[in-house]
Amino acid sequence: MTQFEEIIRKFQIDGEITEVTTLGHGTVNHTFEVDCGGEHYVLQEMNHVVFKYPTEVMNNVALVTEYLRDVIEEEGRDPDLETLHFIRTTSGNLLLQTERGSYFRLYRMIQCGKAMKKPASPEAGYEVGRIVGQFHRRLRDFPTNQLSYTVPKMHDMKKIVRAFTDSVRSDICFRTADCQEQIRFVLNRSEQISYITEAVDAGEIQLRVTHNDPHYKNILVDPVTGKAICLIDLDTVMPGVSILDFGEAVRTGAATANEDEKSGDIELDMDLYQCILRGYAEEMGRVLSEKEWELINYAVWLVTYEHGVRYLTDYLNGEQSATDFSDEQQNLYRAVNQFYLTLDIEEKMDEMNEISREVCCRH
């Protein structure tokens, strides 16, 4: 604990450090729980390989959480419970950079919250949609020009498909011969990827503050009531399109299987989809534009297709983002799962559109 104690003491906290334990199983940042005089904090070593601009990332996070705290207080609620509170260093900074080039940050732990598990009930699905919608609603008036694009062109589908076609042409790992069906799947849909970008360019969809990774695992819930408390893991907060966040919440929250499973037996649970939509609309139904409502289910399709393309590209390039290096086909499994899910969404699109029209009319 000596190493961590030296780091922790450079933040503005008091009390004796009694325990530091590893927290979670994150593959990006190294995260630890700190018990200091009975107060609990989260210490994170940021991965500056993944996040190449840690100062800009932290500036975005600070601006957004400070704004959220004001909004939450105005609503008469507790900001220490419903958003993160970062502790500054003794020098007044939000990040501590060590002599070895590592970056650390510290924030108060929301002890009553636990990471959400895979939604398995209508109530859990509703909470996924509600908390993502609440995040968007509370930040709807935030001036997005204050935020940096810390992951440039994150959902730029033309760039993503271009990277894919480059990987097919180069075939550096000699894998394209065994992936012809998946390659055709991507190319057959490559003309359907720009509807949201075109709507943004036409002024029909405005950019707002988006989370960009509203996976159910990034939602804290009250373990007693099951109610969602807040979104965490804000490193990808930046200007974006709200319905893409909704699409990601549905992709991860309403799929019937985990994307890492090898069976390819995955589809969209329509009951969970409908609950996520209703929860989201409860918060954002009156804020979304007519065009956003028109494209909200297309956004579910698009982010699912996007993940499949990314995974297949990584597989063709040699597993650059694999987490299980013992299985060289991990990203191929992921891609196939996402393509099966994409197909299922296509088959259910008419039903989804009918549901979303009904929900839209109520708001």
Image (cartoon, rainbow, N blue to C red):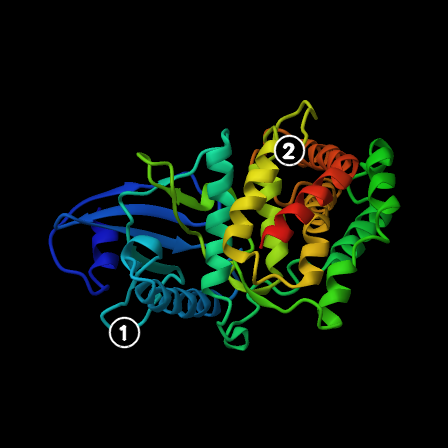
Count every numbered label the image shows and give the total.
2
In the current view of this chain or complex, which residue is farthest to the front?
362
Nearer the observer, 326 or 129: 129
| Label 1 CA crowd tier, 10 Å (few <14, some 14–19, many 20+) | few
Q: Is residue 235 visible?
A: no
Q: Residue at x 64, y 45 (%)?
A: 320
| Label 2 CA crowd tier, 10 Å (few <14, some 14–19, many 20+) | some
Residue 93 to residue 330: above or below: below
Instruction: Say which amino acid is labelled 2.
Output: Met
Dot 1 falls on a residue whose secondary structure is loop
Instruction: Say which amino acid is labelled 1.
Output: Gly
Residue that badge 1 annotates = 92
Residue that badge 2 annotates = 270
Q: Which corner quadrant of the image does residue 151 belong to?
A: bottom right
Q: State the quadrant of the C terminus.
A: bottom right
In contact (CB < 8 Å): disc 2 and disc 1: no
Residue 176 to residue 51: above or below: above
Nearer the observer, 264 or 102: 264
Residue 188 to residue 95: above or below: above
Q: Which corner quadrant of the image does residue 181 belong to?
A: top right
Q: Residue at x 47, y 65 (%)?
A: 139
How far from the left and from the top, in percent, is residue 54? 46, 65
Dot 2 falls on a residue whose secondary structure is helix
Nearer the observer, 287 or 12: 287
How far from the left and from the top, in percent, is residue 124? 47, 36
How far is disc 2 from disc 1 in space, using C-alphas?
49 Å
Q: Is residue 100 visible?
A: yes
